[in-house]
Image (cartoon, rainbow, N blue to C red):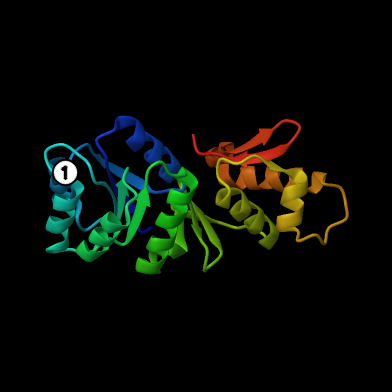
Amino acid sequence: MIDMTILVVDDEVRMRKLIKDFLMKKGYEILEAQDGEEALEIFEKNENKIKLILLDVMMPKLDGWSVLRQIRQNSKVPIIMLTARGEEQDELFGFELGVDEYISKPFSPKILVARVDAILKRTNPEANKLKDYGGIVIDSEGRTVTVDNKQIEMSLREYELLKYLVDNVGIALSRDKILNNVWNYDYYGDSRTIDSHIKKIRHKLGKRGKYIQTIRGIGYKFEIK
């Protein structure tokens, strides 16, 4: 499995936690730093495994621009700058220093995650094929599922259903929505067929099957706990 580690640098504890929670739901490993000096120390120790940095601009000890300059002396790791400012001049300055993306606070965590995914997809095409969801590793190209380093056999429909659930991690999905997206509107039978498939998938996932939660009166949700 290819490690996808992100370094989150922000002096606000609540902001780091918000970003960390959303990224971990997508299977990313997170390292944290509360100021620029700590960020450089952590990056130096973990440079080979850090695939992207989320870097706040205004921080104590050493600001984001200074951290960016030092990292860019030896590394091309993707960097997304986070700032409360939204002025065009600041954005242009950031791009001149080698910023890959620029996001102004406040921002939507889901949009942030989408931008992280997009950048990592461009910069790590091989790694993007494998995604770890709490011990469930899905190879989107080979269409295989591995649980705790053991590949499990799944039918095409079971694989597509599991993939749809993990792609919408943390979101409660109705049976109708699952049918429309996994069965592609071509199924006219009882929606309870989903329950049957879910039961089989849970069994195959073993102890990881608990990640697929039943939402009473609605349908199902995949959530890592």
Tell me if residue 212 can be seen: yes
Quarter of the figure with residue 157: bottom right
In the image, residue 24 lies at what x, y percent? 42, 43
Tell me if residue 134 can be seen: no
Quadrant of the rendering where the N terminus is positioned: bottom left
Residue depicted at x 67% and y 60%: 155
Which of 109/103 is in front?
103
In the image, residue 18 lies at what x, y percent? 40, 36
User: SS for tag 1?
Assistant: helix
Residue depicted at x 56% and y 64%: 143
In the image, residue 137 lies at what x, y percent? 47, 54
According to the picture, the residue beneath numbered tag 1 turns out to be: 36
Looking at the rendered structure, the kind of residue marked 1 is Gly
Alpha-carbon neighbours of circle 1 within 10 Å: few (<14), some, or many (≥20)? many
Quarter of the figure with residue 101: bottom left
Residue depicted at x 75% and y 44%: 175
Against 131, residue 83 (above or below) is above
In the image, residue 161 lies at what x, y percent? 66, 53
Which of 80/161 is in front?
80
Quarter of the figure with residue 126: bottom left
Against 139, residue 64 (above or below) is above
